Image (tube, rainbow, N blue to C red):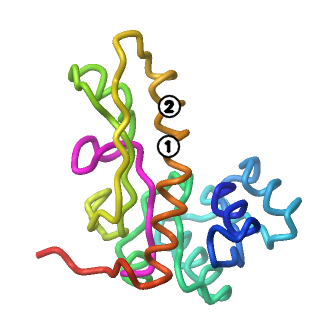
Amino acid sequence: MQAIVKACQSGKLDAEVVRVISNTANAAGIDFAKQEGIEALVCEHKHFNNRIDFDAALGELIEQAKPDLVVLAGFMRILSSNLVEKFLGRMINIHPSLLPKYPGLDTHKQALAAGDSEHGASVHFVTPELDAGPIIGQVIVPILDQDTEDSLAQRVLAEEHELLVNAVQHCLTGNVQFTALN
């Protein structure tokens, strides 16, 4: 999220971040957004009785901002199909693996355990199936002999920023459009 905000400020990205929402009050992105004058809201999932109620409240907060694009950058909650369908084709996510390899969590650990020679990150459209939407872009990071989960994660994260900014630009300019997979 910070990379997107900075790209907007520098003119590299012709866009405006209109709202930042987190499901945890202590997320660093909330403080950063407030410092940058961006509306920042917290919608804590633990304050809701179930996923459906949380997703309904989150969906309302998103709709109020009237975004052209919803970017999940560090938002670590699985969203219900109802919420995803509401923003289908306008919601993207960044994931630290070369999808379709390693959806879900612990991607760096999985890549190292498998003996992969490369890892990376993917930006994809969000669909109801976890980390399975059409891919917008990927970046490959070689796995080094001395890599640990942490060192690999840091090197992938360094590449994710540019990948995400470029993916947002492609979505907003229409260079990339959502096409449902059959």
Q: Is residue 97 magenta?
A: yes
Region in magenta: 88-104
The chief SS type of the magenta part is loop
Q: Left or right: where does residue 79 sit relative to residue 38? A: left
Q: Which residue lies most toward the left here?
A: 182
Q: Which residue is mark 1?
A: 159
Quarter of the figure with the N terminus: bottom right
Which residue is at a point 40% across and 10% down the rendered structure image?
A: 146
Which residue is at a point 40% across and 69% down the rendered structure image?
A: 80
Mark 1 is on which residue type? Answer: Glu
Mark 2 is on which residue type? Answer: Arg
Whole-angstrom CA distance, mark 1 to mark 2, is 7 Å
Q: Position of residue 93 (x, y in %)?
A: 44, 61
Q: Which residue is mark 2?
A: 155
Q: Left or right: where does residue 24 sit relative to residue 131? A: right
Query: Residue 127: which quarter of the image?
Result: bottom left
Q: Residues within 10 Å of mark 2 (few under 14, many from 20)?
A: some
Task: Say whether marks 1 and 2 touch (CB < 8 Å).
Answer: yes
Disc 1 secondary structure class: helix
Q: Is residue 138 magenta?
A: no
Q: Nearer the viewer, residue 163 or 132?
A: 163
Q: Residues within 10 Å of mark 1 (few under 14, many from 20)?
A: some
Q: How many marks?
A: 2
Quarter of the figure with the C terminus: bottom left
Q: Is residue 54 above or below residue 75?
A: below
Q: Position of residue 37 (x, y in %)?
A: 87, 69
